[in-house]
Image: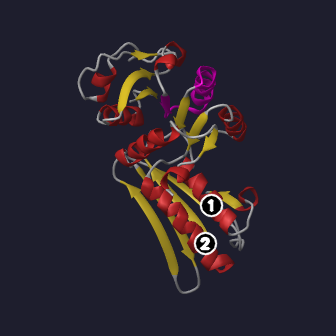
């Protein structure tokens, strides 16, 4: 039985994960956390998730419960993720991270910390999105520089980071496939008289509105035709299901930072 702790238990993903973990025959939810002074600290995590009482209170410090668990699933903020990862490392447990919006410095720190434990991090745990990443790599290599490439993502109006972690990952995959440096060719939105589009530019654009779970489209625009590859999430359960698969995998994985692609392919 894999003993699981959910960080960020009151968030959209946290509530979904609480529900899914309790339905797994090989997993046991043993703890849940939220940030300091969250109004639902002390509440029953099952009631917060809408599945009825579980007898598990939400706590504010992972360190107080970490030794009871095997794997921590983390969908919080970048700052909280780094802090919680340090606690997981100290306890020599495993971790699955779905947090997005990390800075380059935070990602570097996460990679260094993850050398000490089995840790998996992915901006999108969806099976469909990760199949999409494989597909756009293939298509980009086949079409080459003759096609302009643009990425468009859309999310709900409460999402705090932009562009999405998935869009950033898509842009990285495209740049690698096309032998470009995303730091040199990436353009994030356009405004004003920007002139003709440079040949190797990769545009990334963000839309925010309503309750959109997550849409991502890659546009390859050529002369006389265009190719579009899209993924649209209709429910957060697709992300949570991928995190559950990652949790099963990471428990027996070697130390180091892993990606969801290692689980799926």
Q: Tell me which residue sits at (49%, 30%) in the image.
A: 71
Rendered image coloring scheme:
secondary structure
Measured Cα–Cα span from mark 1 to mark 2: 9 Å
Q: Nearer the viewer, residue 215 or 3?
A: 3
Q: Tell me which residue sits at (62%, 32%) in the image.
A: 117
Can residue 193 be seen here? The reply is: no
Measured from the top left, where is residue 106 in percent x and y? 68, 35
Left or right of residue 77, residue 44 in this image: left
Disc 1: which residue: 173
Check the image and report above or below for 216 versus 159.
below
Can residue 230 be seen here? The reply is: yes
Residue 116 magenta: no
Q: Tell me which residue sits at (39%, 21%) in the image.
A: 30
The quarter of the rendered structure image containing the N terminus is: top left
Q: Image quadrant of residue 231?
A: bottom left
Closer to the N terminus: mark 1 or mark 2? Answer: 2
Magenta: main secondary structure: helix
Residue 72 magenta: yes
Q: Nearer the viewer, residue 112 or 186?
A: 112
Crowd band around label 2 with a 10 angstrom C-alpha radius: few (<14), some (14–19), many (20+)? many
Residue at the outermost bottom position: 224
Measured from the top left, where is residue 23 in percent x and y? 29, 35
Disc 2: which residue: 140
Q: Nearer the viewer, residue 62 or 229?
A: 62
Crowd band around label 1 with a 10 angstrom C-alpha radius: few (<14), some (14–19), many (20+)? some
What secondary structure is found at the residue carrying circle 2?
Answer: helix
Measured from the top left, where is residue 147 in percent x and y? 62, 77
Which range is magenta? 71-92
């Amino acid at each position: 039985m894999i003993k699981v702790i959910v960080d960020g238990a009151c968030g959209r993903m946290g509530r979904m994960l609480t529900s899914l973990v309790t339905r797994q025959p090989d997993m046991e939810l043993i703890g849940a956390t939220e940030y300091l002074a969250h109004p639902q600290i002390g509440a029953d995590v099952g009631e917060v998730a809408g599945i009825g009482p579980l007898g598990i209170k939400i706590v504010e410090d992972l360190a107080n419960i970490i030794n009871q668990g095997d794997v921590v699933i983390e969908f919080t903020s970048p700052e909280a993720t780094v802090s919680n990862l340090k606690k997981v490392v100290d306890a020599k447990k495993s971790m699955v991270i779905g947090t997005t919006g990390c800075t380059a410095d935070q990602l570097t720190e996460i990679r260094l910390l993850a050398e000490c434990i089995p840790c998996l991090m992915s901006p999108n745990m969806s099976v469909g999105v990760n199949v999409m990443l494989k597909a756009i790599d293939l298509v980009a290599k086949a079409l080459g520089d003759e096609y302009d490439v643009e990425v468009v993502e859309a999310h709900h109006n409460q999402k705090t980071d932009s562009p999405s972690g998935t869009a950033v990952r898509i842009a990285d995959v495209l740049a690698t496939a096309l032998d470009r440096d995303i730091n040199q060719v990436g353009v994030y939105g356009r405004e004003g008289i920007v002139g003709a589009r440079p040949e190797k530019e990769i545009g990334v654009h963000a839309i925010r509105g309503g309750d959109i779970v997550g849409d991502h489209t890659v546009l390859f625009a050529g002369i006389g035709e265009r190719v579009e590859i899209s993924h649209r999430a209709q429910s957060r359960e697709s992300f949570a299901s991928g995190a559950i698969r990652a949790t099963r995998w990471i428990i027996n994985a070697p130390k180091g930072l892993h990606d969801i692609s290692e689980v799926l392919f």
